[in-house]
């Protein structure tokens, strides 16, 4: 893994760890991204914070030389970012001003950053390459 990818992975880990802690420190801000029709909204915020802490910490673990654990982790992180995206959409639709996103434009622009997080997670962990190899193994060979 190149030094640039390593730095990007460590930075992504830091982002996840800070966000995970924030789920506990300023939980009310995160409620704006949890649809009001869902039960246990506060618990959803706390559980997603725990997931972010676990994923962030896992990104800092050393990878084995010949295994795909880090790449698979990158795919898991990307899937997590996809899974929480509906909450960002809810915030835009509902008009919640959480995190200082107090205009419709700001909330919609926020939506554009989620795909970047997915790409970041896949790129800095080797997840792209792992997915490509996995897809090749699934293709029937003549």
Image: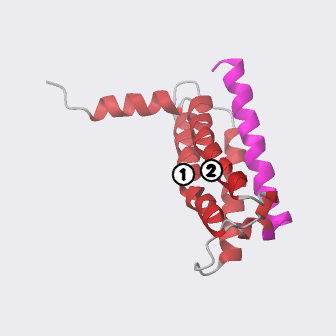
Q: Are marks 2 and 1 in contact (CB under 8 Å)?
A: no
Left or right of 127? Residue 92 is right
Distance from Cα at disc 2 to Cα at disc 1: 11 Å
Residue 111 image label: 2
Asked whether residue 87 is drawn in magenta, I would say no
101 vs 68, nearest the viewer = 101
Q: Earlier in the sequence, mark 2 or mark 1?
A: 1
Asked whether residue 14 is drawn in magenta, I would say yes
Residue 60 visible from this viewpoint: no
> Is 37 drawn above or below residue 117 in the view shown?
below
> Is 106 drawn above or below residue 48 in the view shown?
above
Task: Give the labeled residue for mark 1.
Answer: 82
Say few, some or many: other residues with alpha carbon within 10 Å of mark 2 (under 14 / 14 to 19 / 20 or more). some
Q: Position of residue 60 (x, y in %)?
A: 72, 38
- Looking at the picture, the colour scheme in use is secondary structure
Instruction: Specify the quadrant of the image occupied by residue 124.
Output: top right
Q: Residue at x 57, y 52 (%)?
A: 80
Q: Position of residue 9 (x, y in %)?
A: 69, 33
> Is 95 drawn above or below residue 119 in the view shown?
below
Q: Position of residue 118 (x, y in %)?
A: 57, 41
Instruction: Specify the quadrant of the image occupied by residue 99.
Output: bottom right
Q: Main secondary structure of the magenta part?
A: helix
> How many dots with numbers?
2
Magenta-highlighted residues: 1-28
Q: Residue furthest left?
A: 142
Say few, some or many: other residues with alpha carbon within 10 Å of mark 1 (under 14 / 14 to 19 / 20 or more). some
Q: Residue at x 65, y 64 (%)?
A: 91
Q: Position of residue 5 (x, y in %)?
A: 67, 24
């Amino acid at each position: 893994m190149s030094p640039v990818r390593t730095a990007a992975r460590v930075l992504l880990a830091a982002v996840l760890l800070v966000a995970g802690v924030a789920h506990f420190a300023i939980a009310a801000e995160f409620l704006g991204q949890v649809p009001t029709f869902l039960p246990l909204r506060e618990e959803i915020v706390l559980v997603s914070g725990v997931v972010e802490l676990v994923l962030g910490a896992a990104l800092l673990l050393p990878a084995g030389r010949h295994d795909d654990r880090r790449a698979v982790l990158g795919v898991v992180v990307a899937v997590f970012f996809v899974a929480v995206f509906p909450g960002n959409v809810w915030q835009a639709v509902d008009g919640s001003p959480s995190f200082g996103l107090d205009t419709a434009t700001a909330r919609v622009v926020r939506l554009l950053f989620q795909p970047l997080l997915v790409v970041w997670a896949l790129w800095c962990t080797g997840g792209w390459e792992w997915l490509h190899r996995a897809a090749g193994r699934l293709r029937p060979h003549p």
